[in-house]
Image (spheres, rainbow, N blue to C red):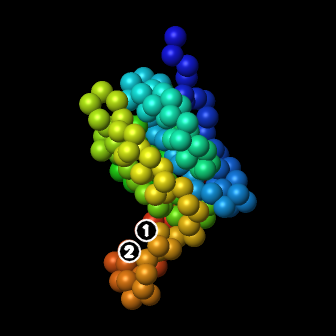
Amino acid sequence: MVPALFDQRRNPFHDLRDALTQARKEHKNVLVTIGGDWCIWCHRLEAFIRANPELQALRDRYVLVNVFISESNAEINADFLTHVPELDGVPHLVVYNGHGYLLCSQPTDPLEDGDTYSYERVRDFLETWSDWRRSIFDDLDTSELKQRFEQHLGPGKRNKLTLSA
């Protein structure tokens, strides 16, 4: 029997709220994995990371949240999923900083390589987003570029996670 990765009884709003609090204290980002135990690629990703100590160490630099989606918890899923970028499949990875700002939304198919995952692509993803950031603008070089992004995105509103439940 394959061990469970996701717990359908958990409330994703509570889990994410607690993860954001922990992330702020520890100066980490939050890595949300959205999927289900029915998803073979979710199990493949977990096994792939666990089989590679460097990837496991990189993932340990995040506060982790697993969000189970299925018909059995459709009501809370529908509400929670309105607060994350649109998904086109699972597993789907979402990275927030400790203040709830969206840093990255990543489907995992670009990380795949045949019937497994690419070590380099998974490593690059985990490395890229593991450093604690106050906002998506932290790595930008110029204030002019920041202003242009804010002009198009709005002043921090479109990428801010709001937990209403």
Q: How crowded is mark 1: few (under 14 residues within 10 Å), some or many (20 or more)?
A: few
Q: Which of marks 1 and 2 is nearer the N terminus?
A: 2
Q: Which residue is drawn at 32% across and 37% down?
A: 112
Measured along the vertical axis of the image, is residue 135 above or below residue 102? below
| Residue assigned mark 2 | 153
How many angstroms separate mark 1 from mark 2 (CA)?
Answer: 6 Å
Q: Which of 18 and 42 is in front in this view?
A: 42
Return the x and y of residue 160 as percentages of the image width and height: 50, 65
Return the x and y of residue 133 as percentages of the image width and height: 56, 66
In the structure shown, which secondary structural element does the residue marked by tag 1 occupy? loop
Q: Residue at x 36, y 35 (%)?
A: 117
Q: Nearer the viewer, residue 54 or 65?
A: 54
Measured along the vertical axis of the image, is residue 146 above or below residue 112? below
Q: How crowded is mark 2: few (under 14 residues within 10 Å), some or many (20 or more)?
A: few
Q: Residue at x 64, y 46 (%)?
A: 14
- In the rendered structure, the answer to whether residue 109 lies left or right of residue 156 reads left
**Looking at the image, can residue 82 be seen?**
no
Q: In which quarter of the image is residue 71?
A: top left
Q: Residue at x 47, y 69 (%)?
A: 136
**Looking at the image, can residue 122 be seen?**
yes
Q: Residue furthest top?
A: 1
- In the rendered structure, the answer to whether residue 86 lies left or right of residue 131 reads left
Q: In which quarter of the image is residue 11?
A: top right
Q: Which residue lies furthest to the bottom in this view?
A: 144
User: How many numbered markers are drawn?
Assistant: 2
Measured along the vertical axis of the image, is residue 109 above or below residue 159? above
Q: Are marks 1 and 2 in contact (CB under 8 Å)?
A: yes
Return the x and y of residue 42 as percentages of the image width and height: 43, 31
| Residue assigned mark 1 | 158
- Amino acid beneath label 1: Arg
Return the x and y of residue 108 as percentages of the image width and height: 36, 42
